Image: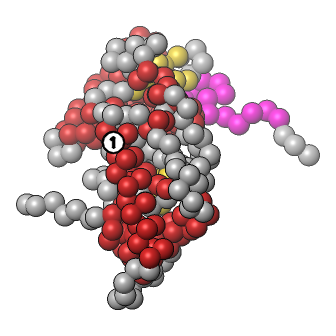
Amino acid sequence: MTKKTYEFDEVFSACIKGKKERKFTDHEERLNNFLRGAHKVFKVHCNYQIYHAYKDESALHGWNGKELESIYEKLRRKKSAGRFYYTKLREMTADGKCQICLYGSVESLDHYLPKESYPSLSISAHNLIPCCLSCNGKKSTHKPKTANDQTIHFKFDHYYDSNWLEAQYSHNSRRITFSPNKSNYPENSIDHKRISEHLRIHELYELYETLALKEIRDLVIRANKNNLNIKTTIESEIELIFENAKYYPNSKFTFNQWKLVTFEALLKSKDFISNGKNMLNEDNFLQPPEYDFA
């Protein structure tokens, strides 16, 4: 089956001309050429994972940044001709999940390099990330200055092809914490720093810890309700993740990655294997703090 490819000129034309059949003005023709060129140059940077090295030359070539930014509004506006391509860009994920947090559902597009600083990429497909509303804009105007500062780009980076995340469980603090997988990405490596930056900027440390604690609570409830061994219950959950991966192999490295490494951390914890079934009976577990505001 031949894969359908949408050309940049199609997208630009829909944004500028809408549904009208007419020729470009000279101004529009020059703008199309400039933005198409920027789109292609940025792809080269993407292929080498040097997003930070891209230089926006809009002002250098005499283009008004606000004018270029405004084209994106014509792409996303409902009932516009450009909306067709906006929807297609949002659908560029097999699982329908946000390609930033890998948890929420895709509801919008986020500019990998902010359009305010890189207006030449305002409608470049390579610069638009399918994401949930929660993730959209979290990094605000963050501009990577070095390779270490670059967040993960779902389309051009390789992280989601293998284990990129790991978790540690502490029974004393009853917390699960996350970090880049040090086995695959040593601490001082650029990859480790990039994953750390991605987790920090998009507040994924907090999100994954919250999700993991809920998963642990539900796991303990199931084990107690069905009188199951806690270790067997964890192993069953891991088996289910790998069973689902038969249909979508990368699921264990994308929307199930935080869950998989959580279960693996629980299996490594002797305290949890021995005492996990009792954790819901422990004092202050999932209880609100003992203070208030008048």
Look at the image and tell me whether residue 81 can be seen. Answer: no
Between 34 and 272, the residue placed more toward the observer is 34
Circle 1 residue: 44
Residue occupying image coordinates x 51% and y 69%: 71
Which x, y percent locates residue 245? 21, 40
Residue occupying image coordinates x 40% and y 13%: 186
Please provide the residue range marked out in magenta.
277-291
Which x, y percent locates residue 45? 37, 39
167 in relation to 27, above or below? above
Q: Residue furthest right?
A: 294
Could you tell me which secondary element the residue under label 1 belongs to? helix
87 in relation to 240, above or below? below
Question: Which quadrant is home to the N terminus?
Answer: bottom left
- Asked if residue 138 lies left or right of residue 213, the reply is right
Q: Main secondary structure of the magenta part?
A: loop
Which x, y percent locates residue 91? 33, 61
In the rendered image, residue 208 lying in the magenta stretch gets the answer: no
Residue occupying image coordinates x 71% and y 37%: 288
Between 97 and 10, the residue placed more toward the observer is 10
Q: Residue furthest left?
A: 1
